[in-house]
Image: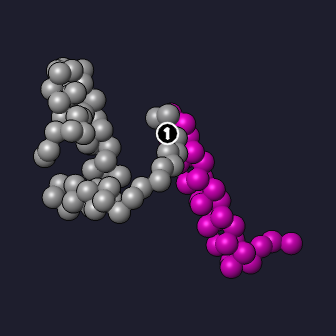
């Protein structure tokens, strides 16, 4: 017996979503993505929101990623400047 139009649409939607999940899984694997879980306090959350707002980023994670990449670049180029920037005893 052949499938009805509603069943065909449901099957196509299911297949399309599965293909999307498969593509996303392969992309995460290709770029070495991993989940990072951390506990965050209110001050850190406000700092991240400030970075997001001032930078005009759609997601806080984008600002965080760029900040980490920038600081890693600074650490490679100028380790002393990195140490000074990361010194918790230096006021902002």
For residue 1, what is the image quadrant?
A: bottom right
**In this view, 81 is above or below 89:** above
For residue 68, what is the image quadrant?
A: top left
- Residue 15: say if magenta: yes
> Can you see residue 36?
yes
Q: What residue span does the magenta drawing correspond to?
A: 1-30
**Whole-percent x, y for residue 90 in the image:** 16, 39
Nearer to the camera, 49 or 63: 49
> Can you see residue 52?
no
Residue found at the far right of this picture: 1
Question: In this figure, which residue is indicated by the disc labeled 1?
Answer: 33
Q: Is residue 91 left or right of residue 24?
A: left
What crowding class fits label 1: few (fewer than 14 Cα within 10 Å), some (14-19), or many (20 or more)? Answer: few
Residue found at the far front of this picture: 89
**Whole-percent x, y for residue 26 in the image:** 56, 40
Please tell me which residue is depicted at 39% across the width and 58% down the height of the picture. 41
């Amino acid at each position: 017996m052949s499938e009805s139009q509603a069943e065909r649409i449901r099957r196509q939607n299911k297949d399309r979503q599965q293909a999307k999940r498969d593509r996303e899984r392969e992309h995460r694997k290709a770029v070495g993505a991993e989940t990072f879980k951390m506990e965050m306090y209110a001050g850190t959350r406000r700092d991240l929101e400030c970075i997001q707002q001032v930078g005009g980023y759609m997601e806080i994670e984008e600002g965080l990623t760029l900040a980490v990449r920038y600081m890693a670049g600074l650490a490679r180029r100028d380790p002393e400047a990195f140490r000074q920037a990361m010194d918790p005893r230096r006021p902002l």
